[in-house]
Image (spheres, grey):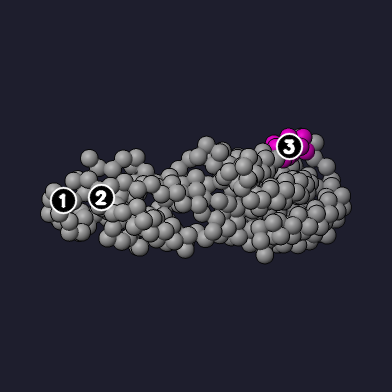
Amino acid sequence: MGNYGFQKIIVAVGVALLGMKLAAWLITSSVAIMTDALESVVNVAAGLIGLYALYLAAKPADREHPFGHGGAETISSSIEGVMIAVAGAFIIMEASSRILNPQEIRQLDLGLVLVAVAGAVNYALGRTAISKGRRNGSPALEASGKHLCSDTYSSIGIIAGLLAMTHLSSVGHDLPWIDGAIAMFFGFVILGTGAGVVKKSMDAVLGTADTALLGCLLKILNAHRREDWIDVHAVRVLKVGSTLHVDMHIVLPRHMAVWEQQMEFSRVGSVIKWEFGDRVDVNIMAEPCLDAHCPHCPKGCAVRAAGYTGREEWTLEGISAKGAPK
């Protein structure tokens, strides 16, 4: 199932779980459970935004959008992060009021059962979404998964806190303000989750270097390195939605013909696409070898300026450098 189809499932399940949590809130009048229901409202709204973003991202590149429409996923995840943070802030304000003016909680047992079932479903769906989003390079799907998991963590904490409050009440320690305190704690947790999603989205917009991706690319190049690939540098990876745009300079023997260079380009592109699949676009620029490369080049040629001293392993700093050695 594709990212778009799985996001449809997230939205449908989100609507059903929202109904369960709203019922639990109306039954119990617990502000802590209300925070769980409110986060589910955000889940559904964010899920719909993510669904539309994935629909746009699936559209092919055109003249107006030569790099495709993958940026819609980044916009979607940033909006979702803001919505999560706003929900967290609202919960904190509501919890503050409930701490100062605690209210009686009713039928807590039934309400907690509904919250527990909803939390279990959210967690299973969230972990699947995160795994699928990372595997397919979809920030929108990964953001949805993180939101679902944060919802589950909130549910677990709320259930534990309300059970503790019920136990204390049964032994003569009536502390109704705990309901508001639990809600406030998880309001801050939700606020932090939203801030984290927004930061990741802004990093994508600003083109922040992804060292994990570069490290994976480096491992691939070292593992499949050919004798003619004398050096690689100026490697850049731009992530637009689920698409990776790889730009790199490769140093080839100076006597190599253009058609031979194209064959090497194809080989480099093939090993990269073997790892990342069709979601990667590789752009390679050839440079002729220099005298400075001779000590680490095993090829025999008439213009060698120095003897071969040994192969130099490519490093993250080396492939990221803008220029070849002089």
Residue 108, visible in the rendered structure: no
Residues 68 and 177: in front is: 68
Residues 70 and 175: in front is: 70
The picture places residue 311, in percent across and down from the top left corner, at 22, 57
Tag 2: amino acid: Arg
Residue located beneath label 1 in the image: 303
Judge depth for marks 3 and 2 and give the one in front: 2
Spatial CA distance of label 1 from label 2 is 9 Å
Tag 1: amino acid: Val
Residue located beneath label 2 in the image: 254
User: Number of marks in the image?
Assistant: 3
Could you tell me which quadrant the N terminus lies in?
bottom right
Dot 1 and dot 2 residues touching (CB under 8 Å):
yes
Of callouts 1 and 3, the N-terminal one: 3
Spatial CA distance of label 1 from label 3 is 71 Å
Residue located beneath label 3 in the image: 90
**In this picture, which residue range is highlighted in magenta?**
86-99
Q: Is residue 266 left or right of residue 119?
A: left
Q: Is residue 217 above or below residue 88?
A: below
On residue 224, which mark appears?
A: none
Could you tell me which quadrant the C terminus lies in?
top left
Determine the residue positioned at 58% across, 51% down: 242
Label 2: state its secondary structure: loop
Q: Is residue 137 left or right of residue 316?
A: right
The picture places residue 69, in percent across and down from the top left corner, at 63, 46
Q: Is residue 108 left or right of residue 188?
A: right
Would residue 95 be counted in the magenta stretch?
yes
Label 3: state its secondary structure: helix
